[in-house]
Amino acid sequence: MAQQADLRKKISVSGTAETEVTPDIIYLSISLKEYFKDNNNKKRVEITELENQLYNAVLKAGIPKENLMVNNISSYNYATEKKKNPDFLASKQYRLKVSDLNKWNQLIASIDAKGLAYTNIESYDYSKIEDLKKELKIKALQTAKEKATYMVEAIGEKLAGVIDIQEVNNEYFPQPIYRATTMMAKADMGSDMNAAPELDFKKIKLSYIMNTVFEIR
């Protein structure tokens, strides 16, 4: 059957709303590894000692202990591995949830740098991001309607109801960038490890466009 042509008078407009927010949920990856204090491989710094340092540093920074989780263990049985290979060095990986990167610097400065294999940021988010998305979409839609209204009234017409709405989003989560060399490299060079690595942490950008079609009376 033939389709009927849509003879309604229409206007198509777009409304935009955007904002930037600082992440307040940050997941950090921390890897600890045993090491020998001497060249004869006799004086070992045990993984339990390094783990206690990390745990105490977390509490000292005011971070709930529940925010620290074990991600991975290099060997499920350290005793067996060490019997097979006296030079075996155990390692553990942890995942830490923080809300403030200033606490990150404080925490890293409290851990033995030679026992710190690596650190990095796994992911991050904003705790009220869903509410923020809703607000932006509403604002973009209101902007579109306001634009359509004054454009139609400029030619002596009136705006009727909306016919179509299409959402376009542009969420940008930039990757944080370290502005310092690796922790282990500094330790090997014998430099001062009290200075924690700096982070260039950019904001989350949310941008929404509402493409709308309104009927003209």
Image: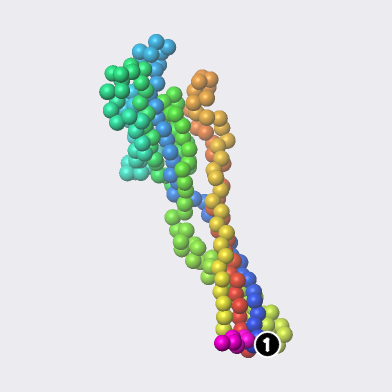
| 127 or 214: nearer the viewer | 214
Left or right: where 149 falls relative to 105: right
Asked if residue 151 is positioned above or below residue 93 in the image, the reply reads below
Main SS class of the magenta portion in the image:
loop
Quadrant of the rendered structure where residue 178 is?
top right
> Is 202 included in the stretch rendered in magenta?
no
Closest to the observer: 100 or 36?
A: 36
Please say if 211 is above or below 47: below
Q: Position of residue 138 (x, y in %)?
A: 53, 70
Question: How many numbered tags mark residues here?
Answer: 1
Percent position of residue 85, x then y: 33, 18
Relative to 120, residue 159 above or below: below
Decide: is 172 above or below 16: above
Tell me the residue at 28%/18% (across/down).
Answer: 83
The residue depicted at 40 percent of the width and 30 percent of the height is 32
Could you tell whether 124 is left or right of 83 in the image? right
Range of residues picked out in magenta: 1-6
Which quarter of the figure has residue 31? Answer: top left
Query: Seen in the image, is 150 located left or right of residue 19?
Result: right
Identify which residue, 116 or 100, lies in the foreground.
116
Whether residue 133 is visible: yes
Q: Nearer the viewer, residue 62 or 37?
A: 37
- Position of the C terminus, as image quadrant, is bottom right
Residue 139 seen in this snapshot: no
> The residue under label 1 is which amino acid type?
Glu
**Residue at image point 57% right, 83% down:** 161
- Position of 174 with respect to 31 (left or right) is right
- From the image, tell me which residue sits under label 1: 157
Q: Secondary structure at mark 1?
A: loop
